Amino acid sequence: MITEISHVPASCGAGKSRETINELVNYLLSQPAVNDTYLFASKTNSLTQQNYRHMEKAIQNHPTGGPLPIERVDSTTHTNTVGRGIEELLRRPFRGVIFISHSTLASLAGKELHGARIVVDEVPNDLAGCIMVRHAAKDHNYPWDKYLIEVPSNHPGYTSVELRPDAD
């Protein structure tokens, strides 16, 4: 059962994933022990890898230096066995953060997800019409928006946000 959905309002490319990972690392490393399984689901394997690498760096740069167990399970790390790889981790049970794709998350049965905390990086297309996210007026038209421009991203279907060249 879903008990909480949090929406992080910010422009594309503003660093939502990076800051979410930083906060998760700070939170987990401030605990006496990691007692939960976190699934961090990203839209593509490329983004899964990028987020995994960012968490590795965030752990290394944290004042405690870890340890924080993290795994990445996708078709580049578990060829032909993605489903088995994630199921084994969840059955173990793994305590830490597992980076997966949206498609892997969608393939998991509800009973396998029991007790897991799920972080979804970008709303999957399949859920875009099913989940209602309410945006407050304060989530739009920030004063700094006029200094931003959208540019093509290296990831298909995405754009990135950069400072305008003429921004002071």
Image: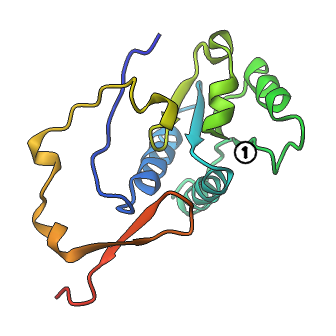
Q: Name the residue: 85% across, 27% down.
A: 84
Residue picked out by circle 1: 72
Picture layout, residue 159 above or below residue 76: below
In which quadrant is the C terminus drawn?
bottom left
Q: Secondary structure at mark 1?
A: strand
Picture layout, residue 117 above or below residue 10: above
One can see residue 31 in this view: no
Q: Position of residue 76 (x, y in %)?
A: 81, 51
Q: Nearer the viewer, residue 112 or 21?
A: 112
Q: Name the residue: 46% across, 56% down.
A: 18
The single residue placed furthest to the right in the displayed view is 80
One can see residue 13 in this view: yes
The answer to whether 94 appears left or right of 130 in the picture is right
Q: Nearer the viewer, residue 92 or 75?
A: 75
The answer to whether 112 appears left or right of 147 in the picture is right
Say which amino acid is labelled 1: Arg
Q: Name the residue: 89% across, 44% down.
A: 79
Q: Residues within 10 Å of mark 1 (few under 14, many from 20)?
A: many
Q: Position of residue 33 (x, y in %)?
A: 59, 31
